[in-house]
């Protein structure tokens, strides 16, 4: 729903819809019950390469730890969608993980 005064998006607060720009409060009608959308916190840890299996693709890249020339890799979108994905490597020999942005 949008504010009728300034046309900005309305957000739910204490059972009312409030405009963050002009501060106007609007009572939602019974037919227009607002949906509250929540998102989970980004404070959690996500295992990227928890278990390395033989099915992961490999690349010929030098490990910064042991110098071995082969590593498993995966692509993860670690930042915003309009930025490139992060390539995460894990050495086949020593299991050291590193990133390439």
Image (cartoon, helix red, strand yellow):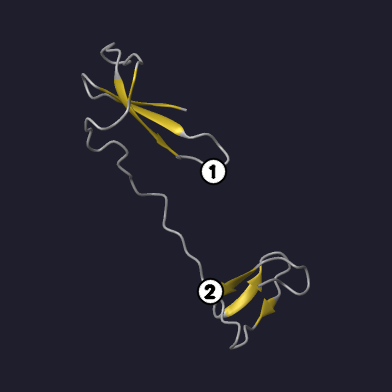
Residue extending farthest to the bottom is 30
Q: Residue at x 71, y 65 (%)?
A: 8
Q: Residue at x 29, y 17 (%)?
A: 70
Q: Residue at x 56, y 74 (%)?
A: 13
Q: Relative to residue 24, is residue 53 depicted above or below?
A: above
The crowding category of the residue bearing disc 1, from other C-alpha atoms within 10 Å (few below 14, some 14 to 19, many at least 20), is few
Question: Do the numbered discs 2 and 1 sit on residues whose CB atoms are within 8 Å?
Answer: no
Q: Relative to residue 15, is residue 49 depicted above or below?
A: above
Observer-nearest residue: 17 or 83? 83
Write down the quadrant of residue 16 in the picture: bottom right
In the rendered structure, the answer to whether residue 61 lies left or right of residue 85 reads left
**Label disc, if present, on residue 23 of the rendered structure:** none
Residue 50 on image: x %, y %: 25, 38
Write down the quadrant of residue 100 in the picture: top left
Query: Which residue is label 1 attached to?
Result: 81
Write down the quadrant of residue 61 in the picture: top left
Residue 69 on image: x %, y %: 30, 13
Residue 63 on image: x %, y %: 31, 16
Q: Relative to residue 41, is residue 22 depicted above or below?
A: below
């Amino acid at each position: 729903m949008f504010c009728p005064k300034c046309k900005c998006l309305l957000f739910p607060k204490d059972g009312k819809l409030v405009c963050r720009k002009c501060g106007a409060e609007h009572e939602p009608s019974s037919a227009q019950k607002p949906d509250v959308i929540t998102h989970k916190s980004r404070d959690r840890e996500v295992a990227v390469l928890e278990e390395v299996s033989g099915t992961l693709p490999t690349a010929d890249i030098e490990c910064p730890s042991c110098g071995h020339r082969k590593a498993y890799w995966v692509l993860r979108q670690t930042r915003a969608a309009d930025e490139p994905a992060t390539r995460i490597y894990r050495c086949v020999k020593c299991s050291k993980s590193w990133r390439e942005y």
